[in-house]
Image: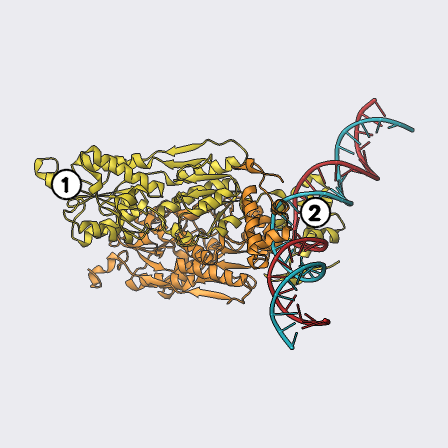
Chain colours: A orange, B yellow, C cyan, D red
Amino acid sequence: MYFNLSTRGSGGRRATSKEVAAEAGVSPATVSNAYNRPDQLSPALRERVFEVARRLGYAGPDPLGRGLRRRRTGAVGMLYTDRLSYAFADPAAVMFLEGVSQATEEAGLGLLLIPGGSLGDRDPEAVRGAAMDGLVIYCMAEDDPLVEAALDRRLPAVLVDQPERGDTPSVGIDDEGAARTAAEHLTRLGHRRFGVVSLKLTPNATGGFADSQRREYATYRSSRSRLKGYATAISGAGLSPGEMPVYECTENTPEDGRVAAEAILALHPRPTALLVMSDQLALGALEAARRRELSVPEGLSVVGFDDVPAAARAAPPLTTVWQPHAEKGVKAGRLLISQLRGEEASRTEVLPTRLVLRGSTVPPAELWSEGGWS
Amino acid sequence: MYFNLSTRGSGGRRATSKEVAAEAGVSPATVSNAYNRPDQLSPALRERVFEVARRLGYAGPDPLGRGLRRRRTGAVGMLYTDRLSYAFADPAAVMFLEGVSQATEEAGLGLLLIPGGSLGDRDPEAVRGAAMDGLVIYCMAEDDPLVEAALDRRLPAVLVDQPERGDTPSVGIDDEGAARTAAEHLTRLGHRRFGVVSLKLTPNATGGFADSQRREYATYRSSRSRLKGYATAISGAGLSPGEMPVYECTENTPEDGRVAAEAILALHPRPTALLVMSDQLALGALEAARRRELSVPEGLSVVGFDDVPAAARAAPPLTTVWQPHAEKGVKAGRLLISQLRGEEASRTEVLPTRLVLRGSTVPPAELWSEGGWS
DNA sequence: ATGTTTTGCTGAATCGTTTAAGACGTTATC
DNA sequence: GATAACGTCTTAAACGATTCAGCAAAACAT
């Protein structure tokens, strides 16, 4: 009969189920049953086991021991493009996480945010060593070694906003179509000179204008597809997309967007419209215009992507591509969970997008006299 | 010699280190060493082990087996007041998480978001069964059974924005002092009739005006302290805080804030100033005023709490109490990590706050003729 | 040639559970 | 009265790794 009360606090070793069993004079199996299958033992004994457990400071089965035996952890992992802390600074990612967490919480699962390290030296150890039952892989570059490492685990997984891989289910949007729609909106308004403020094209992006080869071989699918969508629209208007300046940002922040837009607006001839790959960047573009005393939309049209809440509150309110971030998260989570349950999941889900017209886009100034707009 | 290539994909059993060992003709200990202590075996053999591992589809040591043996998981948990998905909808919580994730990522640790379930029936199973090396407990009610369950695990922990407990380190702000400062700002401007839009006072809050007993026995420390701070300031101005209406919200959303403010503004006599416990709620209060065609600040002063980014962009910009959300997260994370490293951590950290004066507060209209303001 | 250290590997115990399968006494069934 | 069924509890074998003491051979020193 050995007590263990001294271990209150974070120090000291916790009691094990075996010790509880010994102290209560039963077998370990019975202790296990007390916690996991109340119907397998008499209520009286169960109570006694709990009583002893309390006395010994045993707070229930150790998750690792249990997990090892049961082959399941009760948590799903989430892998993000970049440093974890950046995810929380990106409204779109936060909304996505909101959706994922909703799905996982419904299922009683934990959500394990896996540290990737900075993009420079991604450390696969964390994803190799993370205790999880499955994972959602969000917005990663198609050649990111972490994706490889993650998939190697052979866990149930779902890819989000990424190229398909093997038979892993995926959810995403039609980036190319959405971008095309956004650009066509501008060509229809009569714009002829565009600039693109782009998200990262490859993980090791250094920022700056991207040449056509770089555009072609972007390893982030979303960026590549959106670029393609923009280009298609431009071509459709009889223009040549190759000449269109594309400034690649390294972070999805208003600051980076501002810098990019400033670079583009310094060009001659100056574009009359900016195609921006995210609202975070677009907010920065608005700021750039403001600093140049170039009024939006009169002097410059801007169309964003994502439709984050701040887009509607911006001055002027931002014309942008809406996409269902939270729903994407919920879908991804559910898809993963149904795999965990062994159900055969649908292969791929493409969620709808919608161009939201607000105040940041009008015909170019050159056309005003032609009666299109006043 | 047995291959296992058929298990590509999520199905199939993964190879174990023992199988790799057998196939490579070495002992399991050697396989382990190949992964964990490269210096313990010849480079040639190590390469051979990896080669066999690759062939067999062995992606490195199983996290659970390893975790069990090593007594450590490589992840820290995070426990939140409410449903996880709500955390992502609350900018303050998101900033806090940003900080925590920064700290954990630096240390190469995962961040496990523990599902609590809805507040009604909190399920302690998840916190009992979560595989983690330590946890941060954020903004929980002092009588929440989940806190008890979490502390019972005897893991290293840190409490955030919560009453101290035992010798668990904690980080927070001086809620009472900050609230008092906010309220004193208004009393100094000459306001005499106040309304309080309050965050939840207890987990099972139903919303509505809270009587004095309810205010007294609030189990969320932040709410209780802020209420106390407001009251102190009011008393200091020679008024009686007991008469001040306090409307308790159930969620920290603009919608709830609007509803609360509407209820308060319908009172007679109508308060000239609103003390609001969060900016999310305050944004809703502004909306309520707008709907009543009551202009802020001329007809109503509003002071918030948190200084979320949207506060500065609101119309009018919100006077509010700034607090270092992200830094709080970093501090909490670091405090936890230093415990994990066995370092004796400081007991308690109180972070600074600051009242940020913006456009939502002016003297009450009654005083304008007296020359104070125009 | 002998003693000592180093290198490279293995055997066996251990981490804390869960879970088939089975033992044993009691009660229901025909 | 035999048999089946049941309720309760136990035995023993996993689950997948790590770690420490130890051992043989090789390298080095004397």
Say which of A56 and B170 sits in front: A56
For the point 52% across and 66% down, which residue is it? A345
Quadrant in which the C terminus of chain B appears? top left
Task: Locate residue A92 relative to residue B18 in the image: left or right.
Answer: left
Q: Looking at the image, is mark 1 or mark 2 nearer the viewer?
A: 1
Residue A237 image position (x, y, % from top left): 35, 65
Quarter of the rendering containing residue A36: bottom right
Distance, label 1 to label 2, CA atoms, is 76 Å
Residue positioned 12% across, 35% down in the render: B372
Q: Amino acid at mark 1?
A: Pro
| Residue B244 percent across, percent down from the top left | 21, 43
Tell me the subunit letter for badge 2.
B
Q: Which residue is mark 2?
A: B31
Q: Sequence order check: which comes first, mark 1 or mark 2?
A: 2
Whether residue A198 is visible, yes or no, is no
Q: Which residue is mark 1?
A: B364
Measuring from the top left, give residue B6's x and y in whole percent: 66, 63
- The amino acid type of the residue labelled 2 equals Val
The N terminus of chain B lies in which quarter of the figure? bottom right
Specify the quadrant of the image occupied by residue B303. Answer: top left
Mark sitting on residue A109? none
Q: Secondary structure at mark 2?
A: helix
Q: Residues within 10 Å of mark 2 (few under 14, many from 20)?
A: many
Q: Horizontally, is A21 left or right of B242 in the view? A: right
Closest to the observer: B54 or A100? A100
